[in-house]
Image (tube, grey):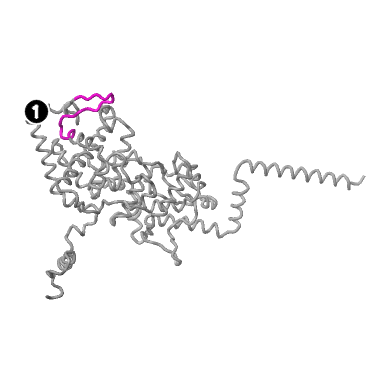
Amino acid sequence: MAPGDNNNPRSPKWVIEIKNLLDGGLPPDARISWTIGRVPDNWRKVHDTAFHPEMIGIGPIEKWRIRAMDDLKKWFLIRLLGGKLERWRRDGEVSRTTEGERVCNGCEREEDDDGSRMAKAVILDDLVEAMQKLEQKTRACYSESFFNITRENFVKIMVVDGCFVVELLRLNYQRVLFPGMATEDDPIFSNPRILRTVQRDLLLLENQLPFFVLEKLYELINNKNKIDHQQAVPLEVLAVTFFDPLLPQHHAASKLDTNKPKAHLLDVFRSSFLKSVSEKVHEKGKNQVKSWLNPDGSMRGLVRHFASELQEAGMQFKKWKGHDLPDIEFDHGTLQVPQLSINDNTVSVLLNFVAYEMSVKHPEPFFTNYLMFWDSLINSPRDIQIFRKHGIINHLGSETEVVELFMKCREVIYDLNLGYLYNEIKEVNDYCEQFYESKYSVWWRSLIRDRFSSPWTCLSLFAAVILLLLTLLQTFYTVYAYYRPH
C-alpha cells in the first residue's frame, strides 16, 4: 500500500482526518476569525469581577452559569411577542395583563384573541426559522465549538437571549424618549441598581451574541410591528443609548458609523469612543502606527517619566472637556486628557474593551494603547493626586487602589503597538529630555519640590530670612557703635 494512502486501516482515525485535511484543506468555517471567546485566566487576576456576569448570562458561554434569570428572559420574549404577562409588583402581588394594556409607539394594541394568538405563534416560528439558518454562522463566531449543545438548544439560546436583549434596548430607548413612561411594574427598569448591573453584564466579552443575530431579530420584530426597518432607529443607536450611563459621553449616537459591521454589543459601544482617534490615525497614516523600539530593545513609545516627574519638568495637565475618552493631546507643554471616572463598572468596561482587542486580530488596539499610556504615567499615589487635582481622574476611593489596578494591568498588557498615541508620547518624552539635560533646571526643581512643597515651609523660610536680617542689623549696629569715632 502506498505511503500516502489515506485508507490505510492501521492508521488511527485522527491521522486519517489530518491526511484528509492535507488533501482537501480546512473547512470554510475554520478560517473564520472568531470574535467572542473566553478571557485568559491571568486577566481575571487584574480585577476579580471584571469578566463575570452578576445577573444575566447571554449566549452559550455564560448561559449555563446563571440560570436564575431564565424566567425573566422568557418574560421579555412574551412581552415582545405581545402575549399575556404577569406584572411583578413591588408588594408581591401578581396581576394578569395583556400587551394591549401597554402603550407602544403611541397606539394601543388589539386585545388577544384566537387570530392574534395564531399570528404570535407564526412570528415566533419566523424567529426560530431565521435563527436556524444562522446557527452555523453563529457558532463560527465563538472560540469554541460547543459540541455539547444540541442544535435545538443552541437555536433556543439565540432566540430567547437575543429577543431579551432587543426588547431591553427598545424599551430603554422608549424611556429616554418618554421620561414619564411607567416602569413601576418592570423588574429591571424599576430598580436602578439592577439596571446598572444588567448594563454592565451585557458588555462582557464572554457574555455576547453576534450582532448579526440581534440585527436579524430586530428586523423581524420591526416587520411584525409594521415598521419600515430601513427607517427605524438603528440597533447600534439603541445599544449606545442603553450603555451610555456606564461611560457617559457627549452625543455618543452621532459618533457611530452604522455602515461598518459590528461584532457584538461590546464592539458597538467601543466604536462610539473612536471617531476622533480613528480620524487622527487616518491622517497620520499607517507608517506611524507601528511598534517603536530603542536599539537596546526598550520601548520608545512609553512615557519614560511618571506624572510627578512630568510636573517637576514644568509640564501642565488639563482636563479636556467634550472629547472622546482615548483622545489625548500634547500641546505646548500641556497634556490634555479627557476625564476618566474609575469605579467597578468603568473598570469592567475598559478591561473588556482591551480583552477584545487583544484576543481578536481585526480591531485596532486603541484602548490597549490607552491603558498602556495611563500605566506609563502612574507609579505612586502622588501621581494619582496630580490627576485628581486637575479633575482628570475621578475616583471616590483611595489613590492606592487606583495605583494597584494599573500595576495589575501592567502584568497582562504587553502589546508593543503604541499606535495612535505615538506622536503625543514622543513629544512628552522630548519635552522631558530637554529639561533633564539641564542640571540647573533639575537642581532648581528639586529645591522647589523639597523645600517649598507647602505654604508652611515658605512661611518658615520667610521668617528665618527676616530673623537672619534682624540679627545681621543688630550685629552691624553693635559693631558700628563700638568703632564709631566720638
Q: Residue furthest bottom?
A: 2
* Quarter of image, res 457: top right
Q: Position of residue 71 (x, y in %)?
A: 22, 35
Q: Nearer the viewer, residue 473 or 410?
A: 410
Q: Which residue is mark 1?
A: 113
Q: Nearer the viewer, residue 171 or 327?
A: 171
Q: Nearer the viewer, residue 410 or 265?
A: 410
- The part of the chain drawn in magenta is 78-95
In-image side of 378 versus 180 (left or right): right
At x 15% / y 37%, what residue is drawn? 227
Q: Is residue 200 magenta?
A: no
At x 50% / y 42%, what residue is drawn? 389
Quadrant in the picture for the C terminus = top right
Q: Position of residue 201 (x, y in %)?
A: 30, 42
At x 61% / y 55%, what residue is drawn? 443
Q: Position of residue 210 (x, y in %)?
A: 22, 48
Q: How many numbered discs?
A: 1
Q: Residues within 10 Å of mark 1 (few under 14, many from 20)?
A: few
SS assignment at label 1: loop
